[in-house]
Amino acid sequence: MTDSSRTSLAAPWKTPCLIAGLVGAAVCAAGALIQPGQFWPGYLTAFVFWLGVGLGSLGIALLHRLTGGRWGWSVSRPLVAGAETIPVLFLLSLPLALSLPTLYAFGGDDSHSSLNAQQELYFLLPFFFGRAALYFVVWNILSFGVSRAYKRDREHGVTGGGARRAALGLIVFWLLASFAVFDWIMSVDPGWYSTIYGAQHTMGFAVSAFAFAIIVRHFSGRAASEPDARTQDLGSMLLAFNLLWVYFAFSQFFLIWSADLPIENTWYLRRSEGLWAAAAPTLAVVHFVVPFALLLSQDVKAHSRRLAGVAALLLAARLIDLTWCIVPAYDVAGAMTAVYGLAAFIALGGLWLFVFRLRWEKLAILADPVMLPSAKRDSADSLEAV
Amino acid sequence: MTDTHVQSDPSTEPRQTVRSVSQQISAIVLTEGPPRGWWAGFLVSFLLVMLLLVSVGWLFAKGVGIWGINQPVGWGFAIVNFVWWIGIGHAGTLISAILLLFRQEWRTSINRFAEAMTLFAVACAGLFPLLHMGRPQFFFWFIPYPSTTGMWPQFRSPLIWDFFAVGTYATVSLMFWYVGLIPDLATLRDRSRTGRGRIIYGFLAMGWRGSARHWKRYQSAYLLLAGLATPLVISVHTIVSYDFAISILPGWHATVFPPYFVAGAIYSGFAMVLTLSIPLRAVYRLQNFVTDRHLDNMAKVMLASGLVVAYGYLMEHFLAWYGGHQLEEFMLLNRMFGPYAWSYWALIGCNILIPQLLWFKSVRARPLPLFFIAIVINIGMWLERYVIVVTSLHRDFLPSSWGMYEPTFWDWSTYLGTIGLFAALLFLFIRLLPMISIFEMRELVHEHEHSGGASAEAGTS
């Protein structure tokens, strides 16, 4: 809880992050030049992973502003700092403009045959880039709103205000995130579509972000070393977010499996060839069974250290899931994709964490309003049901 | 969504005491005679129950041919009504179990009543698949029992899963409701002034004496049941959505169906709770228990779940366009501009457009507009199932197999009859059992008195 423990644990982040980011970026630049076919799928995966942490933070920060509740206050600082990284995520997305011929059917000159007329229209490049710009502009506005509200709470105490704006923001956020998932992830398999795909990945972003915030909270020294109710709340929320993801992912699989229509099942068939066949069972274990079993236990979720361990497992599971969703779509991807993917993961992660850390330092600690007598009822009264 | 702070708007009136709570709620059952409105309402619903009996009797005599179902629309009203009632049944468990686990103390004055509503709605829902079978006397073929004929149900059919899901749901809801009633039944036993009342309520109270040990056992049982009931809120309507989505029919097969059905169920369930609680609290003057804050919160949950439903529609429409699949495109165009277009546009109006009024605090604060919006949503959610069932089936893959569906008098009479059954059961419930949990309200009042209206643990302890 003391300041000294916080700095001793958290301060050494920054420089190594920057160095790792720059070294990784150099490897990425080489990869992009030498083997673009192997490189770009790895870069896209790493980008979507870190985008998920930032976007998910924004979404959960909006959700908490809407609903209130004790669970959110103890992670509001990492969540708001995460939301504030959206400009850097925009910068990190820019290299992907070079990747279009490799990654997307609509990016090349002659590969239009696999798209139908509507998709040709939807993926006209000016429209595609315009949408991407719109997403980032709007997400940025929302993240401004979230951080301004945080600072206002810091100065004037928590009033519970701004809920209506947060509700509108959450709707816009969710819609744009769904369409961003269609634009950037679903489109790696040209022609394939699933109506739940946007919600599924947006929920995946929330899992990443909440897991990340739990880890940051643990290492920031703000968490008690003894089991406490606040930590347990976080564990329950992590369980809830993850179960929603599992529910969406399983529903999609189950309905496509049972209908077995060729226009849909190719997605899973592609992803069960060769080594990829191991991915889905692995996900079932590390994204569902193990975290589910662990998070049911109060012994695990009330201990900050153990909870952070489960959160780390879920972050790893998120990376496996995104890799499995993206990379098998590319025949050109190969063993080097793993190497470049790792380099991109480190590069983007290093740069992102560096910026995150800067933003996080700038945010003053918000006194937990549950501790304040004036807001004591808030935790019990506000609508926590999502 | 409230800019005013919650403290200014508590879930009980400040002047309530432990004694006044027991007095006011139990008096409705024990001492006050039923108001004239009760008799009128019960009479109307009782007549509708008679209509149901006639309809079902005629159905048994003649077979399902008296309904409008035929090729290609074989499901018709029976399944529309089944899904509608099951959806309504979701609010009870959501309010009771999930809000309990989330420590939402405002649930306390509406949970009993919402649970009863759930039971009656599930009973109405359960009727329809049985009646739709044609030979309802063989309903037990659903049960996988080792018979000498070696006949087993088709385990890959979601209709079989429905049987288990709805059966489990009904059982757990009943247990949850009854266990929650026991301390109140004891209160009624003790306050009852007639020997008959003491015997009946005493029998049902199972010897409850309110000892510390009883309360401890009670609490663990109640929390365990809440934990058991929580996944059921999701699972039942997920399986109902599988009834449709597992097929390959355009308009039914969409991966977004499970969460969108669950959201729709919560939507219609809260709409029904509002539809019932607004008149009830006016007739029985329960504004000090079901406060404006309850209505406000329920309206917000309704708005949120309605927006999830709207998201489901949007995804279906966008991806049908994006996918460029001829049959999917046709299905949507047929819904929007085909012979059943009226139902589609009415659905959009009822489920998406009109409920946006709930964004305004002034609308949420007025019971009358809220009541009308809730009814509009009930209609909208019925239309949603009608659109899904009828418009998807009536024109599928082959134009040569297309056809139209017209509900007959008996379709309507059976449907209205179940509404009567639902209402009649509710009227009896209000007359015979405490519609608000007496002991939970006492606990709430007690906590407010002792903590100056502040307790983070209220509702669970």
Image (cartoon, rainbow, N blue to C red):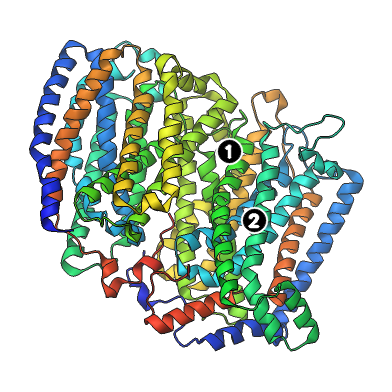
Q: Position of residue A220 (x, y in %)?
A: 19, 51
State yes or no: discs 1 and 2 in contact (Cβ < 8 Å): no
Numbered badge on residue B335:
1
- Horizontally, is B459 left or right of B152 in the view? left
Question: Subunit of mark 2?
Answer: B
Q: Position of residue B96 (x, y in %)?
A: 55, 62
Going by the numbered disc 1, the residue's amino acid type is Arg
In which image quadrant can residue A366 be found?
bottom left
Residue sitting nearer the eye, A175 or B393: A175
Numbered badge on residue A245:
none
Going by the numbered disc 2, the residue's amino acid type is Val
Numbered badge on residue B172:
2
Sooner in the amino-acid sequence: mark 1 or mark 2: 2
Instruction: Let me know if residue B340 appears in the view.
Output: no
- Identify the element where label 2 is drawn: helix
Local crowd size for mark 2, using a 10 Å CA cut-off: few (<14), some (14–19), many (≥20):
some
Question: Subunit of mark 1?
Answer: B
Residue sitting nearer the eye, B52 or A34: A34
Local crowd size for mark 1, using a 10 Å CA cut-off: few (<14), some (14–19), many (≥20):
many
In which image quadrant can residue B336 be found?
top right
Q: Residue at x 15, y 13 (%)?
A: A33
- Identify the element where label 1 is drawn: helix
